[in-house]
Image (tube, grey):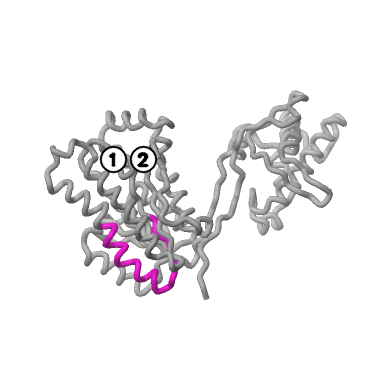
């Protein structure tokens, strides 16, 4: 039986600031997506519905302490707005499957409890409601290998895959204790270490390979490097990635499917001064990704690359405050990236949602990349 990759489950809507036509009546509401949900008799605009819901919520807050099921003490206008808000909320919760609660959970919950919790929530809760879209994946019965998963980006990736149901094997020079994962001490520059790690998996299929093991090296002009330093950079970032892929790819070939995600760098696209050897290694990762994707496109194996800019990891922080501050200043978003943001892109690339992507290089630089 052909094994299917994970598909995304939308759990919440993403925000986009907008105003509804109801603002003509002096009503403002928070950020939301302008989407329409169709009913049998026509369509109900979420823009109008959200405004009515927010008006009902404001009235409930003003009347906090009064049970909306008991209209005593409420004006006719209050009762009408609250009831209408509840009806709209009930429609939204049940029509949008999985948006707030999976449908299986809705059947087990008291609808009034769900609705009243939404109506009576605090302003802080409202901010959470309108947070960015949260997408979860189901990687049950899939096996993933993550190199360099002991810390930083690799750890965030391993944690996200494990949380999504995958059996995760972390290959790193340092052992790591992370719930739901297996830790194997592996130096990706040593062929025997990789072979031994594969043997420990006892013939398991490998559905996902994330090549994240990396070494930045010193931040200085190339002419000031010791040859051993730039050779180490090439060995870990480029040759190690090649060797791991060389040994894992036949496993994927046997089952005819798989996802390979290689972590390159903004340096590989731009060529960053004082990081010449690292830039060269990362450029090699990008070129290898494109070439390999064309070699395996006769199967369901997809090969993609992510090119992060400065991410808030120990590897970046070890460069010193002055260098980190300069990186933040150079970023259009004026901050370092979060490892979890990179992990979110990785798990998407490992899912069926990106089945049409291969040989691609995804920028994760906060707008710093020029192409």
Q: Quadrant of residue 327?
A: top left
Q: Residue at x 36, y 54 (%)?
A: 262
Q: Nearer the viewer, residue 100 or 307?
A: 307
Q: Which callout, 2 or 1, points to the residue nearer the camera?
A: 1
Mark number for residue 16? none
> Of helix, strand and loop, which mostly describes the magenta segment?
helix
Q: Would residue 80 be found to the left or right of residue 316 on screen?
A: right
Q: Are marks 2 and 1 in contact (CB under 8 Å)?
A: no
Would you name the residue on which mark 2 appears?
309
Q: Quadrant of residue 20?
A: top right
Residue 120 seen: yes
Relative to 168, residue 75 above or below: above
Mark number for residue 271? 1
Q: Residue at x 67, y 39 (%)?
A: 34
Local SS, label 1: loop
The residue range painted magenta reads: 240-261
Relative to 125, residue 106 above or below: below
Relative to 179, residue 130 above or below: above
Image coords of residue 88 (percent x, y): 77, 42
Relative to 238, residue 251 above or below: below
Rendered-image quadrant of the C terminus: top left
Whichever of callouts 2 and 1 sits on the residue coming sooner in the sequence is 1
Local SS, label 2: loop
Q: Residues within 10 Å of mark 2 (few under 14, many from 20)?
A: many
Residue 143 seen: no
């Amino acid at each position: 039986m052909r094994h299917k990759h994970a598909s995304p489950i939308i759990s919440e809507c993403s925000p986009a600031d907008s105003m509804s036509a109801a603002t003509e009546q002096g009503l403002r509401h928070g950020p939301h997506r302008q989407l329409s949900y169709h009913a049998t008799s026509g369509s109900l605009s979420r823009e109008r519905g959200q405004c009515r819901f927010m008006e009902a919520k404001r009235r409930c807050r003003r009347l906090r302490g009064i049970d909306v099921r008991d209209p005593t003490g409420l004006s006719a206008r209050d009762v009408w707005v609250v009831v209408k808000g509840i009806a709209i909320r009930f429609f939204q919760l049940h029509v949008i499957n999985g948006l707030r609660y999976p449908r299986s959970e809705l059947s087990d919950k008291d609808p009034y409890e769900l609705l009243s919790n939404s109506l009576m929530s605090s302003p802080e809760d409202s901010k959470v409601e309108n947070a960015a879209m949260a997408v979860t994946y189901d990687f049950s019965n899939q096996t993933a290998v993550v190199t360099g998963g002991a810390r930083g980006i690799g750890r965030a990736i391993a944690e996200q895959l494990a949380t999504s149901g995958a059996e995760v094997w972390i290959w790193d020079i340092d052992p790591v204790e992370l719930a739901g994962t297996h830790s194997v001490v592996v130096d990706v520059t040593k062929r025997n270490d990789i072979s031994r790690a594969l043997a420990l998996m006892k013939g398991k299929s490998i559905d996902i390979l994330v090549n994240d093991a990396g070494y930045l090296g010193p931040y200085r002009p190339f002419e000031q490097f010791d040859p051993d330093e730039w050779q180490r950079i090439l060995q870990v970032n480029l040759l190690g990635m090649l060797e791991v892929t060389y040994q894992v790819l036949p496993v994927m070939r046997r089952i005819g499917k798989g996802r390979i995600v290689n972590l390159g760098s903004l340096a590989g696209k731009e060529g960053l001064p004082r990081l010449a050897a690292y830039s060269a290694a990362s450029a090699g990762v990008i070129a290898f990704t494109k070439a390999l994707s064309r070699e395996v496109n006769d199967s369901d194996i997809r090969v993609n690359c992510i090119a992060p800019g400065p991410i808030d990891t120990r590897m970046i922080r070890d460069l010193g405050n002055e260098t980190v501050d300069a990186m933040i200043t150079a970023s259009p978003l004026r901050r370092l990236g979060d490892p979890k943001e990179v992990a979110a892109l990785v798990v998407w690339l490992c899912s069926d949602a990106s089945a049409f992507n291969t040989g691609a290089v995804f920028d994760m630089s906060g707008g710093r990349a020029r192409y």
